[in-house]
Amino acid sequence: MSTYMPKKADLADRKWYVIDAAGKPLGKTAVEAANLLRGKNKPTFVPHEDCGDHVIIINADKAVLTGKKLDNKKYYHHTGYIGHLKEVTYRKLMETKPEFAVTKAVKGMIPDTVIGRQALTRLRVYAGAEHPHAAQKPEVWEF
């Protein structure tokens, strides 16, 4: 018995999915998005090929962080100057830039390789319920 290896023509068909993050935990939404971006839901998945789909996440501002994560979890970034390590709580981050918080969660769940960076280009995150990708006829992804 030989191992099945998909060809480039088999992997070229990319679908579009919409994930509604309203009322759902941020981590669970990010896991589903990362799996779709990598293509792990397909029977033709191979880890060394880029076989994922496009993902649209809507209602990012209504995503939920469980427990005390809103106040205890912090986002750190460095400006490049000595002593300029900045920290922002996720409560403030979710109020000001919820798209960034969701994107950062998804980015942490895909591999830091060329394939992972290509997969992130297929992620679109919107704070509200509207998105401009109706022409692609995205399917609703339920989990």
Image (cartoon, rainbow, N blue to C red):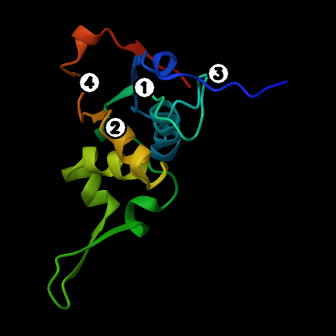
* Quarter of the figure with residue 133: top left
Which label is found at residue 53? 1
* Mark 1 closeness class: few <14, some 14–19, many ≥20 residues within 10 Å: many
Q: Name the one closer to the observer, 41 or 130.
A: 41
Residue at image location 26% in from the left, 24% down from the top: 129
Badge number at residue 129? 4
Q: Whole-Å distance between the Cαs marked 1 and 4?
A: 20 Å
Disc nearest the viewer among 1 and 2: 1
Mark 1 vs 4: CB contact within 8 A: no
Query: Mark 2, mark 3: which one is toward the viewer?
Result: 3
Q: To which residue does mark 2 refer?
A: 62
Residue type beneath disc 3: Pro
- Amino acid type shown at disc 1: Asp
Mark 2 against mark 4, which lies toward the viewer?
Answer: 4
- Circle nearer the N terminus (2, 3): 3
Of the image marks 3 and 4, the number of the one nearer the N terminus:
3
Q: Amino acid at mark 4?
A: Ala
**Is the residue 7 above or below the residue 120 in the image?**
above
> Which residue matches tag 3?
43
